[in-house]
Image (cartoon, coloured by chain):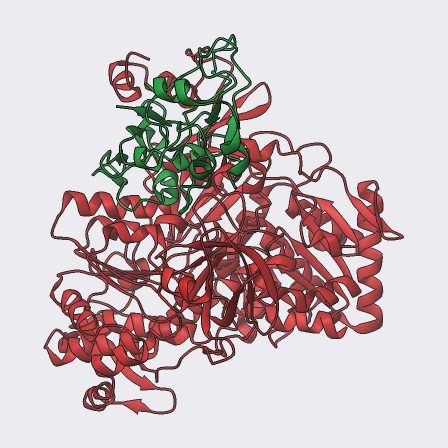
Amino acid sequence: MLFFRKTESDNGRSENYDFFAPTGAADNASFLLLCNKSYNCVTACPYEAIRVKRTEENSPFYGYPVIEPRTKPCYFCVDFPCIKACDSGALKEINIRRQTRKAFIDTNRCFAYNEFVCQTCFINCPETGAIFFNEENQPIINSELCTGCGICVHACLKEEPAINIKTH
Amino acid sequence: MAFSRREFIKSSAAATAAASIGVNLLSGSKNNLFADEANTWHKSVCRFCGVGCGVMIQKKNGKVTAIKGDKENTINNGHLCVKGFYLHKIIQAKSRLLHPMVKKNGEFEQVTWDEALTTVANKFNEIRKNHGPDSLAFYGSGQAETEETYMANKLFKGCIGTNNVEGNPRLCMASAVGGYLTSFGKDEPIGTYEDIEKTDLFLLIGSNTAEAHPILFERIVRHRNKNPHVKIIIIDPRKTPTDQVADLHIFPKPGWDLEILHAMAHILIKEGYADEDFVNKHTVIKGNDKDFTWDEYKAFLETYTPEKAAKTSSVDAEGIIKAARMFGQAKTAMSMWTMGINQRVRGVWANNLIHNLHLITGKLGVPGSDSFSLTGQPNACGGVREGGGLCHLLPGHRLVAKPEHREQVAKVWGVPVENIQPTPGKHTVAMFEALNSGEIKGLYVMCTNPAQSLPNASKYWKGLKDQFVVVAESFFPTATTEYADVVLPAAFWSEKEGVYGCTERRSQYMEKVTEPKEEARWDAFILRDLGKTMGFEKYFEKYNTAEDMWSEYISLTEGSDMDLSGATYNRLKKERGLVWPVPSESHPGTYKRFTDGDPLYDALPADKKAGRRMYFYGKPDGKAVIWVRPAKGPEEPTDAEYPIALTTGRVLEHWHTLTMTGTVPELNRAVPKCYVEIHPKDAENKGIKNKDQVIVETRRGRLQLEARVIDRPIPGTIFIPWHWEEWMANVLTIDAVDPGSKEPEYKVCAAKITKA
């Protein structure tokens, strides 16, 4: 499971947003096992999307490089400088096709499922067809096409995103 | 949450309580599950586009705390787009202008209202005395309430005595006005939004409905999903989010679609889709310099074959033929367009050619058939087109050039008729040119941001800098306040009452929910008080409330084609807007004009109506005009030096110059900065990669921004959203105007793009 969610804080809202391991990680266990915390991928990421996790000391990811899509999503560079920079084998290009993280919509909170007209995730999604609309004009994720990049999470117009990246 | 919001509402008996709970759920908060009794909900209209969605404003502890859709409103049935949802955040924005300020030694200093108004009044009086009334000008807005524009009109046209009264609808709607007037004789659409649910075919041309008018798009999609036989044709040089529903998309080169419309008419007539009976009884055919017969018109169209049109606009001839057949075969058809048609040097002609399709097939005046122009601003129709906020107009679709119109208006205003000049003032672009040359020395800007929104904007900064400029605004700073000598804090939406008139001729009342923040004042009162300070006390004494102004205004519409005399405040406060003509308080409003049910049509003598189903009472013999307009391309076609066509537009999350939506963190997060969309083929040729910094250059300016390589624009075209002051797309656009409507050609100019 590559997906973690912080427990909701005292005021009833979750303060920290969801995160996932950098693109190219096979799965949670092997990523944590293989990553040598060289932070080469953090340095290499041109978007500064890969960051070192410095919150939640109890999280197994504490101190490891992660992507927090609400802050910066993965833009899927053509040449994957993060993977090229990785010398531990934690990130491999071959894993990209295998990874199972996908976007999921929280229909309780999504604008489009609650009588507002909103297409922001659809408009921002770089993968044609990964998000489409049903008859009620509500977005639906096509898991076959979704790359789990998190751009939709970043763009979501809710104060707290109504769309999140999870693993199957 | 164990239940979805819909289930909860279903299970809840108290509808009102459920609605407010719904909003609390929406904001993701758990604690306020149960409605606070102190909440009150107030009826209003969305502040953004011209669709005119009804909203309910939640007030709690003297503050606006939430916005939701008004379920009783027929336009949006409780739905809203995301811009509307965050309106309450805009009211509390840190960038609100709260005190009047006067520029002293190049710095703004806070002053009292008295001092600010006296400064403006003295300066305006001095300019008027030394240089004549025509050296003063007013530049208003399609976002101002009808009452505000009405006050400005009276002050400038009726008291100061200049017709230099313009507004930003000149930049957005003027060509549609020209199109309606020349084709049908009276401004504004024949039908209403009701046609959306009745039509069999939509022709969307030059409109990104999904992003610019989301609620109408939603209605279109809903109607199509329920009725699979409904077809949607899109003619647009860019693949927009609207495309997800297209049955047929024609991608013409920007600015070359007039020939496509002619070619469609060609096919419609050639293949027998024309309704010759309707044409004979209801229309005349006119060219720019002579009248045409039906056969001559057919001969003219012979030269516009789909193949030729396909070649000039670089599309597929098959597509044009298919579009024409779909249009002809559909029982009813509804055309919709926005800026892609209006903001062109041949905007009026393009409008005429769309009307032609409806006239030759008789797809007009029946439920489901209409030639329907969409408005960009909430009150461009209501305040400026109807209220007469342009240099050649007077309230109630009147013209300054007509002596009887001037007399009627002067009588109601209580001003000497000689005060109203018989010649039209300067249109927007000419006005700002005159400001540059010093011919105009004093300008009052209300509720708009011309320093950013004018075409070829940088050219006009000189005039704004040199001359005396007063800006009445709710936000500070904007691109325009930078050049202002005096800034006046204006009350924002929900802090004032008034009327907005939307695209479908519907006038809707907006309640005042809270007091204006700090020292902000209602624009209409600022203008009234300015008038008083300038020495026109007796003309402005009678206006103490918004209702005083509205009642006087609707008395001016009595008996006209846009009769609002039945739309009193009393009634508007209760109802969800009224569609004019509404001649009496018991009249329900009019669905279709020029036909049965229109009070003006019904009042016509029987012999005029004999044998026909429509009577265009704005035209001689009640006959609409099929215009024979030769096709023409853009003012600045692409060439070897500037090989790529630049077009500008909007995104869903933002609105105009960002003074409002730029203050909402959630909207900024979704679209934080400007970009230029470029087709992958063009990008490859230029060696541009996604997210590269590029320089876009036209003959007027250059701009560095981020490239977005995406297959949305067609090859040979780039697209820039125009919202940001930092990346001001309007330093690139061309200020050539349509000779008829004087609307600038924002939508097409030649550019080149290089890697930075």
- Indicate the position of residue B583 as horizontal and vertical percent values: 38, 53
Q: Nearer the viewer, residue B375 or B465?
A: B465
B670 or B178, nearer to the observer:
B670
Placement of B57 over or under B330, stated as above or below:
above
Q: Is residue B705 visible in this depiction of the protein?
A: yes
Quadrant for residue A31, please give it: top left
Q: Position of residue B651 (x, y in %)?
A: 45, 49
Res. B25 in view? no
Question: Compared with residue B10, is residue B625 higher up or lower down, i.e. above or below?
Answer: below
Q: Where is the N terminus of chain B found, in terms of image quarters?
A: top left
Work out whether B306 lies above or below B213.
below
> In this view, which residue lies farthest toward the front?
A87
| Residue B322 left/right relative to B167 | left
Q: Residue furthest right?
A: B105
Chain identifier, colour red: B
Which chain has been coloured green in this picture? A
Question: Residue at point 78% right, 51% down?
Answer: B486
Q: Quadrant of residue B598?
A: bottom left
- Quarter of the C terminus of chain B within the rendering: bottom right
Count all numbered tags in the image, as a single digit.
0
B402 displayed left or right of B270: right
Please tell me which residue lies in front, B100 or A13.
Answer: A13
Picture coordinates of residue B82 (x, y %)? 43, 37
Residue B388's spot in the image, x, y percent?
A: 54, 62
Relative placement, left or right, of B658 versus A108 is: right
Residue at 41% across / 25% down in the picture? A20
